[in-house]
Image (cartoon, grey):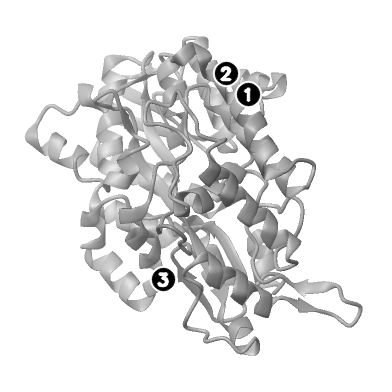
Amino acid sequence: MLRHTFLRLSATALASGALLLAAGVPAHAQGTTEVQFYYPVAVGGPIAKVIDGFAEGFMKENPGIKVTPIYAGTYQETIVKALTAHKSGTPPVTSVLLSTDMFTLIDEDAIVPFDNFAKSAEDKAWMGGFYKAFMLNSQTGGKTWGIPFQRSTVVMYWNKEAFKEAGLDPEKPPTSWAELKTMAAKLTRKDASGKVTQYGVQIPSSGFPYWLFQTLSTTNDVLLANETGNKVTFDNPKVIEALQFWVDLGKAGVHPTGVVEWGTTPKDFFEKKAAIIYTTTGNLTNIRKNAPFDFGVAMIPGHKRKGSPTGGGNFYIFKKSTPAQQEAAYKFVKWITQPERAAQWSIDTGYVATSPAAYDTPALKKYTADFPPALVARDQLPVSVAEFSTHDNQRVTKALNDGLQAALTGTKTPAQAMKDAQAEANRILRGYK
């Protein structure tokens, strides 16, 4: 499943949330505890089959609980539906939503912390067993609000055949900004008329511009927000320098100019329109199945440091569900994130398994021995940072995304774009200081 474009809350989305509720199942039927589970994917497809399989497996082991997955569309559509349902008093019991939605869900008083249910030593050991990088977007104020499930980092994919054709070592991808720019120049190809047929590098800037931009701001050793989510650093000189580097790749002709589509970037890679791409590790299985050439996967090239943002979705438990439903949801979340299932999920999708224990399972050991690129995202976790997240996250993120796109399309300089984004974010966050 791919990440999807952030959209403003719309009347259409709110209406679809209401329709979803109307089709909902009663909370209790014949002594069975009902757990409605919103999952961010369109109906059908391989990921839905995996989720359905997990739900069936859990119900076999827990006959008193009925888990009903509801495929609620994009991440954005899913949070709209979940919050609409929360406001009407009939929320889902649990949902997978972006880890960056944590502050919004807390501000809406929509969720309860997992600490409420983790009573035993075993429960606490389970909650403490996830990779620390994933907990950066899952905890605040000393409480755990989300449990990592489908989590990712941004990684770099490169076409080894294109490297050979350009006279580059196909086993040595760029490891720094300087190498990236130099290699991208050698990898860029033009036809007889001078039109570019293959760009050296492509970093998408639609859908989640802020997330891809974090590969540049992080490696330039600057964080875009503080831990409490009420202050941003868009006008920091290091942030502006990182954006200037991205803009300059386009000006140098080694990267497409303007806004680059998130959804078509893997296809551009398959069709040899881009020799190097940045995208989620969640695309790994897709790229492995569809790339018609030998490819490599590597950590994001560094500058002042190495690093990438984490990304993806967490499980949350909703406050207005009954205590019995909350306990049942907790049991389901604990079950689905056990090492064996986390390992299988990683193999099936390309997402990072969320705990070190998952990588010690025989299944994932065998898979990564046969396909070492599956370890790259995990190995990047020690230098990964939290995905950008603040209070009133969608509006603040929109200010940043608008600024990034203004710079990439040339309507503003990077400095002006980030200065304007900072002013807008300061205005939105004033009430959270």
Can you say whether 25 is above or below 256 in the image?
above
**Label 2, residues with CA under 10 Å away: few <14, some 14-19, many ≥20:** some
SS type, badge 1: helix
Is residue 54 found left or right of 61 in the rendered image? right
| Label 2 vs 3, first from the N-terminus | 3
Is residue 148 found left or right of 266 in the rendered image? left
- On-image quarter of the C terminus: top left
Residue 424's disc is 1
> How far separated are the C-alphas under marks 2 and 3?
41 Å
User: Is residue 168 visible to the viewer in this orientation of the structure?
Assistant: yes
Three-letter amino acid code at the position of disc 2 = Ile
Can you say whether 319 is above or below 100 in the image?
above
Give the residue pinned by disc 2. 428
Residue 85: x and y, percent?
Answer: 52, 17
User: Do callouts 3 and 1 mark residues in contact (Cβ within 8 Å)?
Assistant: no
Residue 173: x and y, percent?
Answer: 50, 76
User: Is residue 208 visible to the viewer in this orientation of the structure?
Assistant: no
Three-letter amino acid code at the position of disc 3 = Pro
Q: Nearer the viewer, residue 61 or 51?
A: 51
Question: Residue drawn at (43%, 64%), measured in percent from left and top?
Answer: 299
SS type, badge 3: helix
Q: Nearer the viewer, mark 3 or mark 1?
A: 1
Give the residue pinned by disc 3. 373
Question: Residue drawn at (72%, 43%), measured in percent from left and top?
Answer: 413
User: Do callouts 2 and 3 mark residues in contact (Cβ within 8 Å)?
Assistant: no
Q: Nearer the viewer, residue 406 or 126?
A: 406
| Label 3 vs 1, first from the N-terminus | 3
User: Do callouts 2 and 1 mark residues in contact (Cβ within 8 Å)?
Assistant: yes
**Label 3, residues with CA under 10 Å away: few <14, some 14-19, many ≥20:** some
**Label 1, residues with CA under 10 Å away: few <14, some 14-19, many ≥20:** some
